[in-house]
Amino acid sequence: MPRHGGHPVGDERWSWIFLVAGYAALGAYVAGLALLRRRPPSLRAVAAVAAAVQLIPLAAPLLVSTDAWTYWSYGRIAAFHDANPYVDAPADFAGDPALPHTGTSWRETPSVYGPAFTLASEGVARAAGSSEDAAAWLFKVLAALAMLAATFFAVRVASAKAYACAFVGWNPVVALHAAGGGHNDTWMAALVVAALALASVRREVAGAAWAAAVFVKWVPLLLVPLHALERRRPGYAGLAVALAALAAVSTWRYGLEWIRALEPVARKAGEQTSFALPSRIAELGVPREGAAAALAVGFAAAYVVLLREALRGRARLGLAAALLLLATPWLVVWYLPWPVALAAAEEDRTAQWLTIGLSAYLLPQAVPL
């Protein structure tokens, strides 16, 4: 799909073909999961299919979203303009080759991403130079590798390893926005599931993985308390040391302005995407603000229940992530790696059904129709 002004556009006929093919793949995914429940094949065979599903989108151009080019733009601000992406916006650099490809809604906004990801984006920006194709390909490859890592760690945690491998690795919607779109949500998902896999054997390293996930995106801050209550000793020393080290490096590179990344996140939370449940409820005549507030209260109540379950020894991080997506007013399809990977690792059937439903519901969300 060609891009105009940082947004995907194209022939509507091809958009419908893309959407129908996506639903066919999703149907095959659900059927494959059902067959695995009855007669699981070898883990090696399931893993081979998972690798194929997650890597095939690398052969396509950047799909549906242009966020990878926005990452590139923020990386270039620091790497090539010796400026601060937490203070300066892409639009401040009119001649930069990334600007025409940056999403229009982000051109006036400093970075909303964690400083660990921004540091990595600097490296990608230097490697890509002025080539938008190289930048897109690099972020796509990194996202694909992150999803394979998330699949691997989910398998390490789960007891039904073949099913967990398929649940993450065979999901075509996740693949379209990982290897297809290069989204950094895959990085966060891989780090969180890695923390779960390491929790029983190397608690301090697991704590460091949690810290790294937080410094990619802020979402794990909601999950850490659940995991801490479940584990009682989730590697506090590793978490504290890693947080301090990452904060020190981030402050050295970006000053204390990196903390300001939470400001645009908070502003976005006040906006709504059309697929978010508050928007859908508003279509029934309920005021948007009231719908958003009701869902926020509902999530808070559910979170309290989940805290109690965590105290009893079951954190249900996948369910928490899925419920967060249901409540957030800023819902996009590429957030799916969080609950998909966690639901597989924890073998939480409720969370798994929710993520399958979300995959079906969100599949058309960014398709230009």
Image: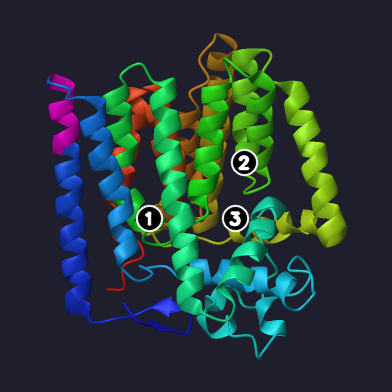
Badges 2 and 3: C-beta atoms under 8 Å apart? no
Query: Tag 2: residue type?
Result: Ala
At which x and y percent is residue 300?
58, 33
Kind of element beneath mark 1? helix
Q: Which mark is residue 280?
A: 1
Q: Which residue type carries mark 1? A: Arg
Where in the figure is residue 83, as x and y percent of width and height? 79, 74
Q: Residue at x 82, y 59 (%)?
A: 253
Reply yes or no: does residue 162 show up in magenta.
no
SS assignment for the magenta stretch, majority: helix
Q: Position of residue 122 (x, y in %)?
A: 67, 65
Q: Earlier in the sequence, mark 2 or mark 3?
A: 2
- Horizontal relation, residue 82 to residue 233: left or right: right
Comparing 181 with 324, the one in front is 181
The label on residue 34 is: none
Q: Which residues are magenta?
A: 31-38
- Mark 2 sits on what residue? 213
* Alpha carbon separation for disc pair 2 and 3: 20 Å
Q: Which residue does the numbered mark 3 point to in the structure image?
A: 269
Alpha-carbon distance for marks 3 and 1?
16 Å
